[in-house]
Amino acid sequence: MAESAPTESPEPDIATTSTNLGFGVDVGGSGIKGGVVDLDTGELVGERFKVLTPKPSTPNAVAGGVAEVVEHFDWDGPVGITLPGVITEGVMRTAANIDKGWIGTDVYALFSEYLGGRQVSVLNDADAAGMAEDAYGAGKGVDGVVMLLTFGTGIGSAILINGTLVPNTELGHMYVGKKEAEHQASSRIKEEKGWSYEKWTEHVSTVLEAYEALFWPKVFIAGGGISRKSAKWIPLLTNSTPVVPATLLNTAGIVGAAMAVSQGLKT
């Protein structure tokens, strides 16, 4: 079982008048976070609950942590789960910031075993965040192509077309010039190089221009920790498509996971 971190709610508090509820769990490199989601508003009902991601973060250890989060709320319905990797046909194909033993794992069989055979949806973490931002956050009401990009250790991506997810895009690995996009425009590269926002945004703009030429999005939504400082760098970008900061921040993965299972989504 995963080691518990200080929780953000001593006791589950899911008092609500809404009947359209879902449950999402967001698995990250440092924490496994979950909560009840009001699917009418995209807001958490009560506080989220978090346990530390186990070390090593093997499939069975992480699944045990997910079960602990679900049990905390006495939730007995369907569960949506995000993972930091590509998932196709129910199998984990890559593993970012998580144990490499995940590669080749049948994620539906795994979580079904740990969650009593209930309905689950499992999807990439950036895809879940993109779904949430598109429906309830910075992309709400935008028709056409919406792209979420998370700037962190790498660049995560999600593409939605009129609310429908195109899963597992992994655009951070797309070559722009002679380098992968995330090797020139992630926030990690900014820190490693000691770049100013002005210098960094030159590279971000180049990457966004390459995405524009291929996908013609209506808006880019900038996520990741550096999005909290968006006022310092988004105005410096020179690409054509509007760029707006993500608004759901650390709840987006949970909300998107809950959305996915409510829709019966499987990747």
Image (cartoon, rainbow, N blue to C red):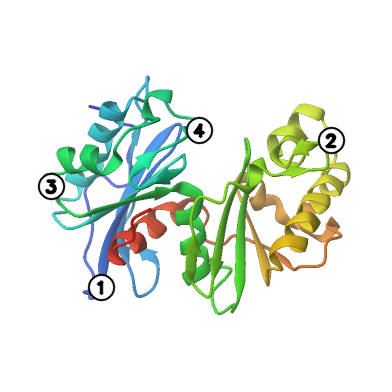
Cα–Cα gap, marks 4 and 2 = 25 Å
Tell me the kind of residue under disc 1.
Asn
Image quadrant of residue 160?
bottom right
Q: Amino acid at mark 4?
A: Ala
The residue singled out by tag 2 in the image is 195
Q: Earlier in the sequence, mark 3 or mark 1?
A: 1
Q: Whole-Å distance between the Cαs marked 4 and 3?
A: 27 Å
Q: Earlier in the sequence, mark 4 or mark 2?
A: 4
Picture coordinates of residue 134 (x, y %)? 52, 68
Q: Which quarter of the rendered picture does the N terminus lie within? A: top left
Within-10-Å neighbours for mark 1: few <14, some 14–19, many 20+: few
Nearer to the camera, 40 or 174 = 174
- Helix or strand or loop: what does disc 3 sit on? loop
Amino acid at dot 2? Trp
Q: Position of residue 17 (x, y in %)?
A: 22, 75
- Which one is earlier in the sequence, the residue at label 1 or at label 4? 1
**In the image, what residue occupies the spot 59% across and 60% down?**
246
Which residue reaches farthest top?
56
Seen in the image, is 202 located left or right of residue 141? right
Classify mark 4: helix, strand or loop: loop
Q: N-terminal of the two: label 2 or label 3?
A: 3
Q: Which residue is mark 4?
A: 96
Residue 69 in the image: x percent, y percent? 25, 42
Residue 221 in view (yes/no):
yes
Label 4 CA crowd tier, 10 Å (few <14, some 14–19, many 20+):
some
Kindly report the distance in space between the C-alpha atoms of the residues bearing marks 3 and 1. Answer: 22 Å
**Residue 171, position as x, y percentages in the image:** 63, 48
Q: Residue at x 85, y 40 (%)?
A: 196
Mark 2 Cα-neighbour bin, 10 Å: few <14, some 14–19, many ≥20: few
Residue that badge 3 annotates: 117
